[in-house]
Image: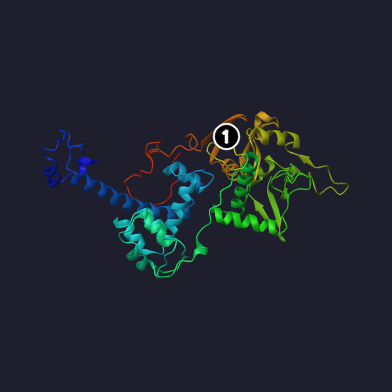
Amino acid sequence: MFDEERSGEEVGEGQGQGQGQGGGAHVGDDWRTIDRRIRRLAERRSTLDAEEARLLVVAKRMEIHKRLGYGSFDEYLERALGYRPTTGRDRVRVAEALEELPETRLALAEGTASFSTVREITRVATPDTEVEWLAHIDGLTVREVEQAVRGRRRGDRPTDRPEPDLEPRIVRMELPPQTYALFLDARRRLEREVGRAMSDAEFMAVACRAVLAGGRPGDDGRGQLVPAPNLPPHQVAIVVCDDCKRGWHDVRGRSVELSPAAIERARCDAVELGRVDDCEKPRRKTWTISPRTRKAVLARDRHRCTVPGCTSSAFVDVHHIRHRAHGGDDRMRNLTTLCELHHTHHHEGMIKIEGEGGAIRVTHADGRSYGAPPAGVRPMSARDGDARPDGAAHVGDSAREPSG
């Protein structure tokens, strides 16, 4: 990398300072050369951050994670870029904010503002105030920028007086493991219901309002939450024709036909009423998986999706590894726990699941191991960190599914 950056002037400055014959940067290089190169790297990093921000917005709108068979966009960012969920969500937030802040986006692309600075500016700047904010923070350190935006809401100007009530309050709690598990489960369920990741403030606001609106612990005398009944998660009535195997879901005065994959997925973990056109008497309902077996499978799998890397524990199904239509039985070794997204991906043919309940193997439709990048894409390694490839794609690039 240093060899590519060296100009004739830099070579001259470094001569006689202990350089090796390879031309790389050594301890003896002129300090001005090293300083200039470090700053140049910072500018290049900002340019890559700007390009990444633009592509993240496009990728999220294309729902690339679904094309690759991942359970969420967070998982895609973790596997493709090596970002932890909180880091990935913050990157997406900044990327979406930059769409309406052209001057801030330009400052990042040109390397005159770092990503850390831009991250703070996007919390308060609007198209009408971004120029003032960029001028105000010019020359400030990241800590000084954080102090400058503290106590201000979106749309405030740098000259406005900060409001102490807007400053976030830090709440530290120490929770025993069982309570922490409840906290995580509740958050995932809420995020599933709203269809996106929630910030700490959003989650706490929704949770507190739910309690104030009438939610309460169970009445077992100990203040513990009463667990939900051991029922399949999809309480939906589906009418299936025995002859053609087509199925419909009746909703609000009309019938919606379901795909064969959707019917197959629903029947993995359901309560079946039998024929409903028998005028004599209704048949006794049957479970595709007995409540006792279902409870044991969920406990074994810790109520989490068993697809590698997936941590979803909300709205999980119990899935027949070898499908019932292919002779699969209801024994625990033929059952595993899947989240709704991965269960759907499997029945739609996007991922394959083999093995036994305690040790399943998940692959993509083209045979590569789950999570492995498509052919021609270099996988991220632990040492890559935040490194990103230099090749820049364009908004017009198509999101391609893995080739088979």
Identified at 39% across, 64% down, the residue is 101
Q: Answer left or right for 361 relative to 257.
A: left
Q: Secondary structure at mark 1?
A: strand
Horizontal side of residue 199 vs 39, given as left or right: right
- Residue 97: where, in percent of width, then height? 43, 60
Instruction: Tell me where residue 299 appears, x and y as whole percent.
Output: 67, 34
Which quadrant of the view contains residue 160? bottom left
**Residue ranking furthest to the front:** 164
**Residue 294 higher or lower than 344, as above or below:** above
Question: What residue is pinned by disc 1?
Answer: 353
Position in image of residue 8 (x %, y %): 12, 45
Q: Is residue 219 left or right of residue 268?
A: right
Q: Can residue 196 be seen in the rendering of this structure?
A: no
Is residue 371 positioned above or below 42 on the image? above
The single residue placed furthest to the right in the displayed view is: 280
Q: How is the image coloured?
A: rainbow
Q: Is residue 366 visible?
A: yes
Q: Nearer the viewer, residue 52 or 334?
A: 52
Within 10 Å of disc 1 (Cα), the crowding (few <14, some 14-19, many 20+) is: many
Q: Quadrant of the N terminus?
A: top left
Viewer-proximal residue among 131 and 53: 131
- For badge 1, the amino acid type reads Ile
Q: Quadrant of residue 319?
A: top right
- Residue 174 or 179: which is nearer the viewer? 174
Which residue is depicted at the point 29% across and 57% down?
A: 110
243 above or below 290?
below
Report the label total. 1
Residue at the (26%, 46%) spot, across then down: 38
Q: Position of residue 132 (x, y in %)?
A: 35, 68
The quadrant holding residue 388 is top left
